[in-house]
Image (cartoon, helix red, strand yellow):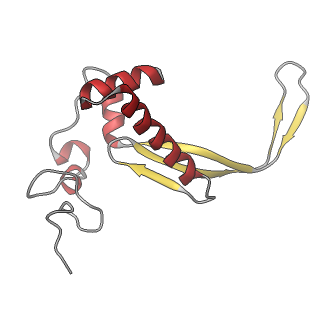
Amino acid sequence: MRKADLINKVSREAEISKKAAASVLDSLVGAIHESLKEKKGHIRIFELGTFKVARRKARTIVHPQSGRKIKVSAGYVARFVPSQALRFSAKGSGAAKPETCEDIGGTLERMVCKLCGSPALRTTLPFCRDHAPQP
């Protein structure tokens, strides 16, 4: 899927114009770029995954054609860690998201609000933002 295909899909499903969908997508990508500009920057998107910055050590590589050794300096690279929901959806059409906690080692129950079923907050498990206890 290309960016144009994604814009078409978002505009159809959200019932917004293609221009608005393109703006939303550009804003999302811009926010990810801004977050990753920091050395320890990261951004977590529920049911998608986490974009983060990782340090890559200096290393020596071998040029595949000439066989010559090349030194590559240390630096920072962007990494993406897919969420559990994304990993389950990528396993193929036969794989379904597990319905019980036992299927995935007991983590599903803690990810969903016990009152309404919406995503739970890490700080107020097992409740969502609306049902979290107020201090």
Q: Taking 49 as reference, is 16 above or below it? A: above
Residue 118 in the image, given as x and y percentages of width and height: 17, 51
Q: Identify the residue at horizontal 22%, vertical 64% (top origin).
A: 125
64 or 23, which is in the foreground? 23
Left/right placement of residue 37 relative to residue 100 reads right
Name the residue at 60% across, 45% down.
78
Q: In this orientation, which residue lies closer to the viewer: 34 or 36? A: 34
Q: Does residue 14 appear left or right of residue 131 in this picture? A: right
Residue 126 in picture, x, y percent from top left: 18, 62
Q: Is 88 positioned to the left or the right of 116 in the image?
A: right
Q: Quadrant of residue 93?
A: top left
**Residue 79: image location, x then y, percent:** 56, 44
Residue 92 lies, in percent from the top left, at 32, 22
Residue at the bottom extreme of this rendering: 135
Please name whichever residue, 61 or 49, is drawn nearer the observer in this view of the structure. Answer: 49
Farthest-out residue, left: 115
Question: Which quadrant is the C terminus positioned in?
Answer: bottom left
Q: State which quadrant residue 124 falls in.
A: bottom left
Query: In this rendering, would 6 be left or right of 112?
Result: right
Residue occupying image coordinates x 81% and y 47%: 73
The residue that appears at 51% across and 42% down in the rendered structure is 80
Q: Is residue 105 above or below residue 5?
A: below
Vertical arrangement, residue 14 with respect to residue 37, above or below: above
Give whichever of 135, 81 is nearer the camera: 135
